[in-house]
Every structure is written in C-alpha cells, then in structure tokens.
Image: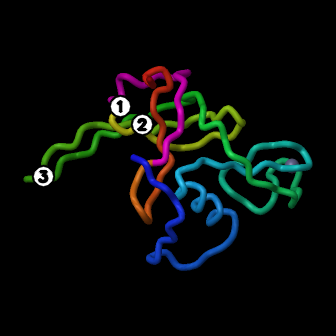
C-alpha cells in the first residue's frame, strides 16, 4: 500500500504535541522516533521529556524500521453467533534497533510463523485517518 502523505485528515481535530507529530510522520508512511540530544536515547512513546535524563531537547529522526520480536501473544477472537470465524492473530512486542520497544502486529502472518528473536521491518498500515505501525518478517522481503 503506497500512501503519499501530504493529506491532512479533515476528520481529525487540529492537535499538537509529540503524539500528533508521531502520527503525522506515520500518516506520511514513515516511522520516526524522538531522540534525546543530551543523552542520545531513542524514545517511544512520544513524549515531551526524555525518560532517562528529563531533558527537553528532543528531536525527531527517521527510524530504520528494523527490529526484533521480543515477545508474542496470540489472540483467538471468539466468534459471535452467525458471524464468520476470525483467525487467531498475534500481538507482538518489537525491540526496535534504535532501542525502544513497540507493541504492534504482523498482518497476514500466522502466529505459528512468528518467533521470538525474528527480525522484522516496520510498515505503515491503514488508511486515511487511521494509520498504524505494523511489522512484517524481514527475511521474506524481495
Ligand atoms: Zn536524555
């Protein structure tokens, strides 16, 4: 899915702050992380203060998007009567190469194909107004 940014979603109220900045990059198809200029820590979730040194000198940098699966939990949705059964899917914690840990999922990858220590790459999933950072197996890429 290629999404060429520059769309400001009219459904979303004007906002500011680190969360908004993060979402703006995500909506643009990019994963960016905050970095503390004082102690060089990469930061996620977006925030105003560095969590390790309380500095306010944070800047945004593009992330590599590469990470390693730290843990995996499989969710098995209970089918509602009359509704089609939904396949189990995984919620994962990914240790980004930059350091922070991020909760995400691997769309279209079945839980038994996900293992701890697996290398993954971030991808922005979703449509206008609701973009999510998802991951997919790094080795399966052409
Ligand atoms: Zn810091």
Residue 80 versus residue 49: which sits nearer the camera? 49
Outermost residue toward the left in this view: 82
Residue 142 versus residue 70: which sits nearer the camera? 142
**Residue 109: numbered disc:** 1
7 with respect to 32 (left or right): left
Q: Which is nearer the N-term, disc 3 or disc 2?
A: 3
Which color scheme is applied?
A: rainbow
Task: State the residue at coordinates (58%, 28%).
Answer: 68
Q: Which residues are magenta?
A: 110-124
Quadrant of the rendered structure where residue 90 is? top left
Report x, y in % for residue 122: 53, 39
**Residue 106: numbered disc:** 2
- What is the secondary structure assignment of the residue under circle 3? loop
Which of discs 3 and 2 lies nearer the camera? The answer is: 2
Q: Are marks 2 and 1 in contact (CB under 8 Å)?
A: yes
- What is the secondary structure assignment of the residue under circle 1? loop
Task: State the residue at coordinates (54%, 29%).
Answer: 69
Task: State the residue at coordinates (74%, 53%).
Answer: 60
Is disc 2 surrounded by few (<14), some (14 to 19) or many (20+) residues within 10 Å?
Answer: many
Height in image: 47 above or below 53?
A: below
Residue bearing the label numbered 3: 83
């Amino acid at each position: 899915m290629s999404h060429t940014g520059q769309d400001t979603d009219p459904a979303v109220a004007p906002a500011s702050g680190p969360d908004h900045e993060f979402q703006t990059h995500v909506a643009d198809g990019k994963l960016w992380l905050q970095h503390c200029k004082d102690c060089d820590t990469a930061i996620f979730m977006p925030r105003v203060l560095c969590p390790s040194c309380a500095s306010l000198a944070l800047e945004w940098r593009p992330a590599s998007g590469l990470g390693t699966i730290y843990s995996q939990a499989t969710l098995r949705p209970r089918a509602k009567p009359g509704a089609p059964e939904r396949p189990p899917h995984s919620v994962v914690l990914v240790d980004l190469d930059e350091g922070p840990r991020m909760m995400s999922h691997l769309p279209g990858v079945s839980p038994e194909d996900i293992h701890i220590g697996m290398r993954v790459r971030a991808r922005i999933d979703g449509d206008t107004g609701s973009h999510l950072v998802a991951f997919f197996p790094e080795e399966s890429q052409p």
